[in-house]
Amino acid sequence: MTLDVSVVGGSGYTGGELVRLLLRHPGVRLARVTSSKMAGLPLHAAHPNLRRATELKFTSPEDLETCDVLFTAVPHGASMGMMGRYMSLGKKVVDLSADFRLKDPADYPKWYGSEHTAPDLLGRFVYGLPELHRAQLKGADHASCPGCIATASILGLYPLLRNGLIDPRRIIVDAKVGSSAAGHEPSPSSHHPERSHVVRLFAGTGHRHTAEVEQELTFGERPRVSLTVHAIEMVRGISATCHAFLTDGPAGRAGDKDIWTAYRKEYGDEPFMRVVKDKKGVYRYPEPKILSGTNYCDVGFELDPLSDRIVVVSATDNLMKGAAGTAVQCMNIMCGLEETAGLDAIGLHPV
Amino acid sequence: MTLDVSVVGGSGYTGGELVRLLLRHPGVRLARVTSSKMAGLPLHAAHPNLRRATELKFTSPEDLETCDVLFTAVPHGASMGMMGRYMSLGKKVVDLSADFRLKDPADYPKWYGSEHTAPDLLGRFVYGLPELHRAQLKGADHASCPGCIATASILGLYPLLRNGLIDPRRIIVDAKVGSSAAGHEPSPSSHHPERSHVVRLFAGTGHRHTAEVEQELTFGERPRVSLTVHAIEMVRGISATCHAFLTDGPAGRAGDKDIWTAYRKEYGDEPFMRVVKDKKGVYRYPEPKILSGTNYCDVGFELDPLSDRIVVVSATDNLMKGAAGTAVQCMNIMCGLEETAGLDAIGLHPV
Amino acid sequence: MTLDVSVVGGSGYTGGELVRLLLRHPGVRLARVTSSKMAGLPLHAAHPNLRRATELKFTSPEDLETCDVLFTAVPHGASMGMMGRYMSLGKKVVDLSADFRLKDPADYPKWYGSEHTAPDLLGRFVYGLPELHRAQLKGADHASCPGCIATASILGLYPLLRNGLIDPRRIIVDAKVGSSAAGHEPSPSSHHPERSHVVRLFAGTGHRHTAEVEQELTFGERPRVSLTVHAIEMVRGISATCHAFLTDGPAGRAGDKDIWTAYRKEYGDEPFMRVVKDKKGVYRYPEPKILSGTNYCDVGFELDPLSDRIVVVSATDNLMKGAAGTAVQCMNIMCGLEETAGLDAIGLHPV
Amino acid sequence: MTLDVSVVGGSGYTGGELVRLLLRHPGVRLARVTSSKMAGLPLHAAHPNLRRATELKFTSPEDLETCDVLFTAVPHGASMGMMGRYMSLGKKVVDLSADFRLKDPADYPKWYGSEHTAPDLLGRFVYGLPELHRAQLKGADHASCPGCIATASILGLYPLLRNGLIDPRRIIVDAKVGSSAAGHEPSPSSHHPERSHVVRLFAGTGHRHTAEVEQELTFGERPRVSLTVHAIEMVRGISATCHAFLTDGPAGRAGDKDIWTAYRKEYGDEPFMRVVKDKKGVYRYPEPKILSGTNYCDVGFELDPLSDRIVVVSATDNLMKGAAGTAVQCMNIMCGLEETAGLDAIGLHPV
């Protein structure tokens, strides 16, 4: 069985990454890739890496036809208005915008600045993070993929919060992101002489992904996560350093062994999660640069022997596990394919 | 009056930066620059930027003579054993190693792994951070310059702790440093294919500079600072993001205005401190890349309206304000020269 | 049928890249990877990207056993002395050193500074560039893979020289290479603060790969190729800009159409050669950065309407088409596998 | 005596660099800096490095007043139409556009695509390269500063052509430039994810600076220079590799000693020219990265012992010696100031 899939909004970076994956996926046939602006042009006009990899051309969104799986990679805010039509075209829909990530409609005006225009659809989407929601994704028709910074933050902290090892009220995430996270539109802040080699405070406080992180890490009490985001010299990749304070539970404060146990319990069987925590070597903690093009999210941690603090580092490719890779992983689960199909690339080293 | 100055340990990065500054300083004559390994070679054999800027050659440490000011830029651990001799040669000594930064001898085995061999000398050194100790530095004979990460961390947090605005028990510093901070010796971790474009967790917890930061930020209770250091793609530069929790004092929790007041009070007259906090623009917060070669430490902050958190960012050039620049600033103050003499370079943009 | 393959010298960058490819190759089983220094350690101790991709550990070279294909990735000069043993172990041997590239033994003292110690073996190796020697490689037992700069230079110039379109006596190649081309051993020149962002004249004249380029591009008269190599900011990748002067043949000087004809004739059916020459767009000429991890060599050209000059640009990943990728391609041809097996990765964009 | 100077077109990168230099120049007072778009805003709104270095604000071009020296840094094509007014305002004018570089009006339609609108003014400008035209610049009223790539190319080749050591008919310049050379306007080609780490063929043939290079290097026969320009990962800096063929003169072909003699003769007394050609070390040839912020143009060369080829490398900071630095140097000469005034910064290392 080969699935017929299409991509809406294929000229952006996330759309291009979806196409790259789908062209090599053993279980699908890529039918259409839409772009209003580039309809009629070959895909490699937007994605030079696809030269000769496909003869497909961009089609107009109006020319979309029904398909087994529809990936929607349109800008935040644009997806909610079109989702009715998308749902009628795709037997299954995997949305990569922010429009269906938050369960509570009140979170949209709070974090995104405007009311949600299709709040009745929110409940129909599974939050597309297989490590947390695999059971729900099996057989689901609609998934909404997490934000890239949210992915790294959630996956770093999940085993600790789920197992009650850290104080949920005082969590700090200091994230570093590459330039592709800001999309493909040029701007003064993305101009190479200004953007290269910066350590730029992009969002000191109040980053939108905070809402997703808190939503997904709620086990009883909603946690209070302070998310700070810096833009640094990198094109792909996210590194999220999570600073948290250990709880003093009835069994005493967690030690190294308890932390290991929690990570192994939650991630031991996960195909794309690796705990990276070596005693020596240059790559003894998660490092985004060797994850480019892979679907891994590596996590590692260190306990401060002098205090009650734990530092967790998680790293991922923002366009892969942070976007298109997770989207394909969701499709695989939703459609009963092998979960790792099309996602088994080994990263490059050196690079 | 022209001061006669010499540099011990001139072949490393810090030593080279001292030479660069001293060659253009209007009040000094650079007499000798020592290097055991490179004695007899021209300075530009180690520092290619000095080609034609000077005819000086490296001399052997044995050939040192007395001078007005002696800068000692030898490795940590090597300075303490030689300091007796250095003090007999230089009327004033400015040390750039870690050997005389900590006041309590017990801190050396704890943070540096071995006993201090000249503990009686510790009390004779002023901690060479003019923004905190200018009065003491005036007329002082011996100064010990801060570590580069310590400089950025202390200067970011000082106004908040001095004025009781944040909780001293839960301070987190997430620092990002460039490759020159690790010195000039090649190693597997500094090899370009491995070091370039990393977001490497260099020290999750327990970085040595923690000791200095806590020492200098003690106002009553010794604070608890958790310092995490990442190596990122950058050659010069440090960016320290300090995450702290506001106190609920008798006058209520500090607001934006209180914070501004504190920074203006402490840094309003400082020649090398700028509060950078604009409402728009690409460089609205401190950015190390435009500070290369300057002696500035820029600081900025953001309050989280949804929580009790404050984020402070400070940025500096690790070889300038983080080392050689502060050393020259100390000399200027100790010797009664204009404090900014030789340090007024404007940074480059773009770069 | 699954081939049993082993890699000698697996701890370097080329060896690691071979392993990465072979682990995902549908027609082979990777049996052994040797390293004297790292025997007993898991492969990811040298190649962090292989974490969890394999359970293999490095074995000692002494523990090698017979196999279908043996890839030898030992340093230049070391391969010639061991080749007798390698040939007795591998039914087929693909050598990645420089030791068997040159056909004339006299070229070794001239270009490599010492006599060849196994000159009788030279004739048994096919120069492993499929685009020039595919017919010879079919069924061959021994191949010697080209140097990375040689690959880019030869593939850029081959259609022009083979078809007599440029003057063979005045060819200039201005090559730019990334840091991985210098191998995995740290040195003062590879130290990140010194190596990053350079435009370093690595070899003004006399680069060793000149010998291969001239050897392979001899059609009648041996050409005179002047090869200049710069190290620039890049980890993977080679870009070779070839400057040549058009000949004034009996049919007049070649024009744009003649050049296109030559490239299409030679490369029209090649699976890994793309002529990249667009009228607009950001990637209208070959660009190494989007080739990382792929086996492509992209070529493009421009004629100067004001003179008799042609500029040819070729780009490739120095560890792939410049080393391990070509080695696997050779194996595929030598063993009758699909030529593109294990080599069909699409490059990343953006990256 | 302090000169009153102003800058027209101060919001671009070249204008910003002029301001940076003029603010620290001991012999001038910076009166006005104009920008149509940013009039009324502080200079640091465009140039963040100038924060606190000056209280000046941008003024409208209409508000210009008479001054001793007027630097005009407006876009190519815009300067020629305004030059009448500029000449009436500035006793001396230093133009940084391309509009007055070429002596022959016919070169403008040929290389810039349109007729010159003020051809009568062309003869009034000295080509502002002091190393070639110092005598003419003394006391001159108008200078036109060279293009950045032209500067590096001319200074690399000048001693060879002036002394008849190379064949003027077959000169190839393979130049590498950083991103600031393309100016401060964002575009798809300058977008960080696309621009970073490229080796992009920017101009295979026909780059406009060819005209200047040929004009200035004409000693008898006009030379034929083929100029190829690549954009590489770098913000500031130009490296021009000149490939040329030695002539067989009556006294035989030039050797290493003859070449040294020529460079020493032409540049031995030049304050900003260094011949960099060491036998060992990492920086044994010109390297742009250590020239950022300096006014040096470093040149070096290598003779091919196996052929008649010479390779010359020249390196400079495109915004300094390639633009604003040379402009200030011209002003110093034209006004009788010390030639190096305001230009004696030592470069940074490491950086």
Image: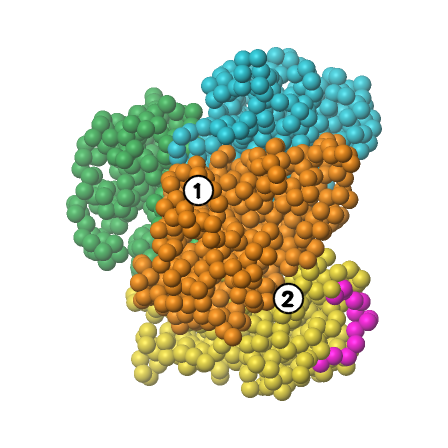
Chain colours: A yellow, B green, C orange, D cyan
Would residue B233 be counted in the magenta stretch?
Answer: no
**Residue D10: percent from left, percent from top:** 66, 34
Left or right of B318 in this view: A98 = right
Graded by Cα atoms within 10 Å as few (under 14), some (14 to 19) or many (20 or more), the crowding at tag 2 reads many
Residue bounds of the magenta highlight: A56-68
- Which residue position is annotated with label 1? C105
> What numbered label is drawn on residue C33?
none
SS at mark 1 in the image: loop
Look at discs 1 and 2 and give the one toward the viewer.
Answer: 1
**Residue D221: percent from left, percent from top:** 69, 18
**Residue drawn 64% across and 78% down?**
A27
- Which residue position is annotated with label 2? A20
Graded by Cα atoms within 10 Å as few (under 14), some (14 to 19) or many (20 or more), the crowding at tag 1 reads some
Would residue A62 be counted in the magenta stretch?
Answer: yes
**Residue B126: percent from left, percent from top:** 28, 42
Q: Looking at this view, is C105 or B240 the one in front?
A: C105
Left or right of A58 in this view: C95 = left
Left or right of B50 in this view: C290 = right
Say what amino acid the circle numbered 2 marks.
Arg
- Chain at numbered mark 1: C
**Residue drawn 72% across and 51% down?**
C264
Left or right of B2 in this view: D192 = right
Q: Is residue A178 visible?
A: no
Residue C138 falls in image quadrant: bottom right
